[in-house]
Image (cartoon, grey):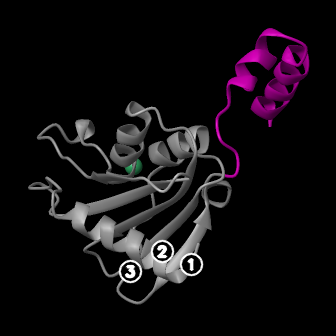
Amino acid sequence: MLTSDIERLLNEAKAARKKAFAPYSKFTVGAALITNGGKIYHGCNIENPSLMLSFCAERAALINALVEGEKKFKALAIVSGDKDYCFPCGSCRQMLAEFAPGIEIYLASGTGIKKFFISELLPHQFKKSWKAQLRGQGKQEYLQEKTQREKG
Ligand SMILES: [Zn+2]
C-alpha cells in the first residue's frame, strides 16, 4: 500500500480507538480494516467485568466486515495508547488467518510503523484439514508420530 494509504488507515484506527470500552485495563485499542474494494471497517476493544468475555479491536473490525458480506481484505491497522506495538492476540491471528490469509497488518507505536503478513504472525494456523487427516489417510501416521512424541 502507498504510504499515504497506510497513514490514512492508521488514522482510521486511531479514531476507532476513541470508542474503546476498557475501564478495567485502561488499554484502549483501535483497528481499521480495508477491503480490496476500498471500504473501511472499524473495531475497538470492548471489555467486560468477566474479562474472558472481552473483545479485541481487530476481531471486531473483521466481524463487522464479515457481517456485511465482505470476503477480500487488503490491510489492517492496529493502534493502542501504548508506546510499544500492539500485536494481535492468538485468537485474532487465527481469525485473520482464516478469513484474510493475504492481509497486510500495520502496527503503529510511539516510534514507528511495522508491517507484517498474517503468515509471519501465525506460521502454523489451525486448519480444518487436520481434522480431515485424523479421519482419513494421515490418521495412522499422525497417531504413530504422536505416540513417539509422548514417549519422548
Ligand atoms: Zn485479539
Q: Residues within 10 Å of mark 2 (few under 14, many from 20)?
A: few
- For the N terminus, which image quadrant? bottom right
Main SS, magenta region, reads helix
Task: Report if residue 139 lies within the magenta region.
Answer: yes
Task: Report if residue 28 lies within the magenta region.
Answer: no
Q: Are marks 1 and 2 in contact (CB under 8 Å)?
A: yes
Residue highlighted by disc 2: 5
Q: Residues within 10 Å of mark 1 (few under 14, many from 20)?
A: few
The amino acid type, in three-letter code, at marker 1 is Leu
- For the C terminus, which image quadrant? top right
Residue highlighted by disc 3: 109
Q: Residue at x 25, y 52 (%)?
A: 45
Mark number, residue 2: 1
Q: N-terminal of the two: label 3 or label 1?
A: 1
Q: N-terminal of the two: label 2 or label 3?
A: 2
The answer to whether 61 appears left or right of 98 in the picture is left
The amino acid type, in three-letter code, at marker 2 is Asp
List x then y, in percent, for residue 107.
Answer: 45, 71
Task: Indicate the secondary structure of the residue bearing disc 1.
Answer: loop
Q: Residue at x 38, y 80 (%)?
A: 109
The amino acid type, in three-letter code, at marker 3 is Ser
Q: In the rendered structure, which segment of residues is drawn in magenta?
A: 123-152
Residue 131 visible in the current orientation? yes
Task: Indicate the secondary structure of the residue bearing disc 2.
Answer: helix
Q: Nearer the viewer, residue 91 or 63?
A: 63
Disc 3/disc 1 C-alpha distance (Å): 19 Å
- Can you tell which of label 2 and label 3 is closer to the viewer? 2
